[in-house]
Amino acid sequence: MYTMDELRKFCFKCRKCRLSQTRTNVVFGEGNEDADIMFVGEGPGYYEDVQGRPFVGKAGQLLDKMIEAINYKRSDVYIANVVKCRPPENRNPMEDECNECLDYLRWQVKLINPKIIVCLGAVAAKNLIDTNLTISKQRGIFVKKGNIYFMPTFHPSYLLRNEAAKKDVWKDLLEVKSKLSSITYRTY
Ligand code: URA
């Protein structure tokens, strides 16, 4: 089992796919390594690539509001992406790029062991829940895998273009909030 620091070091040196050739910085992920909730996006954009931090641009400001909507602070949760390097021109990450990078995310999930993972948008939901998932049809419905509940919802960038979808995401976040309060772990 790797530690988060070891994993970060591997990731910083990673050259497994073409995205490593054009990146400025690896965007590993950040937050509370003991978090109850993880938010997973698709991949870094321009500002994330420059700063080496996830969700720091416009979509990130909206994500901060989404986190506050469930009475958490950004520092309480863990934020990561499916791919750790920026796809050029902000295109969607390709299937082989996601596959090369997913092991890093899987390790992050193992180390954090969150109760809930909110999948932000189709790329995260397809890679973490089911490759055949349709985000517009299946958002808002929890999928349990092992001990973790996955909630597919719209990506904050989509909400910036489609204000009307905000009410759906806020509904999904209420589900997350109530699921969290209903999950109780007994220690013997
Ligand atoms: N969009 C994402 O999917 N991830 C980020 O980190 C920023 C924007």
Image (spheres, grey):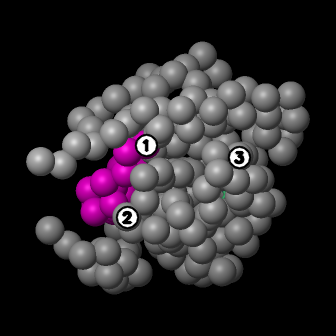
- Outermost residue on the front side: it is 188
Image quarter of residue 173: top right
Q: Amino acid at mark 1?
A: Ile
Mark 3 or 1, nearer chain start: 3
Residue at screen point 60% across, 16% down? 137
Badge 1 vs badge 2, beta-carbon distance below 8 Å: no
x, y percentage for residue 20? Answer: 48, 73
Q: Is the stretch drawn in magenta largely helix, strand or loop?
A: helix
Quadrant that contains the N terminus? bottom left
Residue at screen point 86% across, 40% down? 161
Q: Is residue 99 magenta?
A: yes
x, y percentage for residue 28? Answer: 47, 71
Dot 3 corresponds to which residue? Answer: 69
User: Which of these two is toward me, 153 or 112?
Assistant: 112
Residue span colored magenta? 96-116
Total of numbered circles in the picture?
Answer: 3
Where is 80 relative to 71, above or below?
A: below
